Image: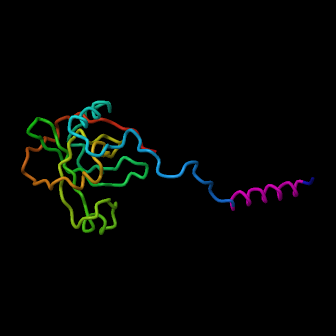
């Protein structure tokens, strides 16, 4: 068989494979939620227990504002942006997150977020419910639905954590 005939045969095989399309999944239906996904209805002690297992690392509070809050799934949708931290009455800390709706970041053509409200609002998320994911923050202890159901946070209603203080936050690896 000539070299030209071999190249032609290879081309036919490659074209056939390309036209065959992607294969079907082995199982039908949604795959089970990974262990890192938040469980609906988690209580504060459950969030704290899971947060302790994420290898908490010291983080300078002033380095957190401006980071994107991501949903812990492979596509990593943006849920909001960290604006600061405040102290709770029990001594813990809450991460203040700005949720932007259709009149927020999306109309500027910047990073779209997964909240469908109008305008933006601030919410206080327990620090135990988030973890560091590289240069971002991942929502680990709340579902996006519970995040959006949190009451609006009123600036000045709690004591701000100073930017030079350190806080211990867990770390997570990428979800893909």
Residue at image position (13%, 44%) is 86
Of residues 161 and 93, the one nearer the viewer is 93
Whether residue 12 sits left or right of residue 26 in the image: it is right
Q: Position of residue 47 (x, y in %)?
A: 25, 37
Q: How is the image coloured?
A: rainbow
Q: Position of residue 116 (x, y in %)?
A: 28, 64
Task: Tell me if residue 50 comes above or below residue 115 in the rendering.
Answer: above
Of residues 49 and 9, the one nearer the viewer is 49
Of residues 22 and 67, the one nearer the viewer is 22
Residue at image position (26%, 32%) is 49
Q: Position of residue 169 (x, y in %)?
A: 26, 36
User: Residue 122 occupies which quadrant of the picture?
Assistant: bottom left
Q: Farthest residue toward the right?
A: 1
Residue at image position (10%, 36%) is 90
Residue at image position (20%, 38%) is 44
Whether residue 157 sits left or right of residue 50 in the image: it is left
Task: Tell me if residue 41 comes above or below residue 77 in the rendering.
Answer: above
Magenta region, mostly helix, strand or loop?
A: helix
The boundaries of the magenta stretch are 3-19
Q: Position of residue 119 (x, y in %)?
A: 21, 66
Q: Is residue 4 magenta?
A: yes
């Amino acid at each position: 068989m000539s070299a030209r005939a071999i190249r032609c045969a290879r081309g036919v095989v490659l074209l056939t494979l390309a036209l065959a399309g992607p294969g079907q999944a082995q199982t039908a239906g949604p795959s089970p939620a990974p262990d890192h996904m938040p469980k609906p209805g988690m209580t504060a002690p459950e969030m704290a227990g899971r947060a302790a297992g994420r290898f908490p690392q010291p983080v300078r509070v002033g380095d957190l504002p401006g980071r994107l809050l991501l949903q812990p799934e492979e596509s990593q949708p943006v849920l909001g942006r960290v604006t600061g931290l405040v102290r709770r009455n029990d001594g813990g800390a809450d991460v203040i997150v700005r949720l932007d709706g259709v009149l927020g970041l999306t109309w500027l053509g910047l990073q779209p977020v997964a909240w469908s409200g109008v305008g933006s609002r601030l919410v206080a998320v327990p620090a135990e419910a988030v973890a560091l994911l590289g240069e971002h923050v991942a929502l680990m202890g709340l579902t996006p639905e519970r995040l959006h159901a949190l009451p609006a946070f009123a600036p000045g209603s709690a004591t701000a954590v100073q930017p030079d203080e350190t806080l211990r936050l867990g770390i997570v690896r990428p979800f893909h």
